[in-house]
């Protein structure tokens, strides 16, 4: 019991009063004004429910699947068929040699050729592409591979190609284009046409040459003089065709053309 100002307060009453006063907010007891709530973030700020969705980023197109009749599962660990399609799309001697040698390694281990893409034919195309581009480094590589693996046919092809690669390179008047001569889209189509012509010439593909001849009048930005030069190159390519078509070689070219398509060389330049 406690006595104050004539009143007797039980101890329990004092304790209750103390507890009630302790519940009063400090700001109210001290005389301070309560703080205003933080202002809401502006609409549209990241993380807000009402914020606009960010613009979607462009995603690269998913690669198309390799056609089943061109796949040989046992060779998947040795060669990338998308890379082979890209090599053929750009008539790239280095990549063609890489893929041909990878196929050859698979054949060495598995003791059989790829069911659709025999190494010897891919390597033969690599030799022709290297000779056409005067790529002696790739020819040297292929010569070493021929000697190591005992590929006598490949060695003979490389020996002949070295003579062509060592000759002076003639200036191709169709290779350069003035900026004002074509639009960027016309130039891209024109460059694709030239690559297709090179591929058809190296492969001895008469069917492809016929298609290119039919496409020539539709090429945009091609002057009459340039058109005549291209017709001359088509005629020279036709003159170099073998007298008798090789069905196996033709089958390889059709297979490579299909790989080129799934490797997106029809859309993106290789």
Image: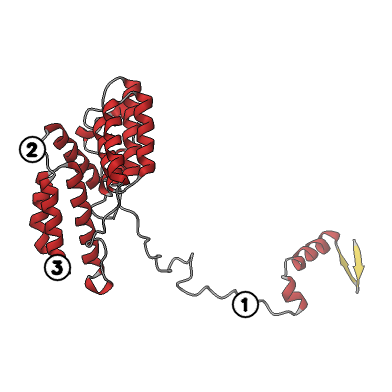
- The Cα atoms of the two marked residues, 2 and 3, are separated by 30 Å
Q: Quadrant of residue 250?
A: top left
Which is in the foreground here, disc 3 or disc 1? 3
Q: Secondary structure at mark 1?
A: loop
Could you tell which of marks 1 and 2 lies nearer the N-terminus? 1
Q: Is residue 112 left or right of residue 77?
A: left
Could you tell which of marks 2 and 3 lies nearer the N-terminus? 3
Q: Is residue 43 left or right of residue 61?
A: right
Q: Position of residue 72 (x, y in %)?
A: 26, 29
Q: Position of residue 1 (x, y in %)?
A: 90, 61
Provide the residue designation for mark 3: 225
- The Cα atoms of the two marked residues, 3 and 1, are separated by 81 Å
Front residue of this view, candidates 211 and 162: 162
Tell me if residue 30 comes above or below residue 163 in the rendering.
Answer: below
Q: Position of residue 247 (x, y in %)?
A: 11, 33
Q: Residues within 10 Å of mark 3 (few under 14, many from 20)?
A: few
Q: Which residue appears at 20% of the width and 44% of the height?
A: 202
Q: Quadrant of residue 233?
A: bottom left
- Is residue 233 among the parts visible in the rendering? yes
Q: Quadrant of residue 38?
A: bottom right
- The Cα atoms of the two marked residues, 1 and 2, are separated by 94 Å
Provide the residue designation for mark 1: 36
Q: Which residue appears at 10% of the width and 44% of the height?
A: 206
Q: Residues within 10 Å of mark 2 (few under 14, many from 20)?
A: few
Check contact, mark 3 vs mark 1: CB within 8 A.
no
Front residue of this view, candidates 32 and 180: 180
Q: Which residue appears at 48% of the width and 67% of the height?
A: 46
Could you tell which of marks 3 and 1 lies nearer the N-terminus? 1
């Amino acid at each position: 019991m406690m006595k104050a100002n004539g009143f007797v307060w039980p101890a329990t009453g004092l304790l209750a009063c103390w507890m009630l006063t302790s519940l009063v907010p400090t700001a109210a007891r001290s005389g301070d004004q309560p703080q205003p709530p933080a202002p809401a973030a502006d609409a549209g700020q990241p993380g807000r429910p009402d914020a606009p969705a960010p613009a979607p980023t462009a995603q690269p197109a998913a690669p198309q699947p390799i056609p089943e009749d061109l796949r040989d599962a046992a060779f998947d660990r040795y060669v990338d068929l998308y890379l082979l399609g890209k090599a053929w799309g750009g008539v790239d001697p280095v990549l063609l040699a890489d893929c041909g040698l990878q196929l050859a390694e698979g054949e060495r281990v598995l003791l059989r050729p790829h069911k659709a893409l025999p190494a010897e034919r891919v390597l033969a195309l690599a030799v022709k592409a290297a000779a056409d581009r005067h790529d002696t480094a790739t020819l040297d590589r292929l010569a070493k591979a021929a000697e190591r693996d005992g590929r006598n046919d490949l060695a003979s092809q490389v020996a002949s190609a070295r003579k062509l690669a060592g000759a002076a390179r003639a200036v191709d008047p169709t290779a350069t284009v003035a900026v004002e001569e074509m639009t960027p889209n016309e130039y891209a189509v024109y460059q694709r046409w030239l690559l297709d012509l090179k591929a058809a010439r190296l492969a001895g593909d008469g069917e492809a040459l016929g298609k290119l001849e039919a496409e020539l009048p539709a090429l945009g930005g091609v002057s009459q003089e340039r058109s005549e030069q291209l017709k001359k190159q088509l005629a020279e390519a036709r003159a170099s065709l073998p007298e008798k078509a090789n069905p196996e070689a033709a089958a390889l070219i059709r297979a490579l053309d299909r790989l080129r398509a799934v490797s997106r060389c029809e859309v993106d330049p290789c």
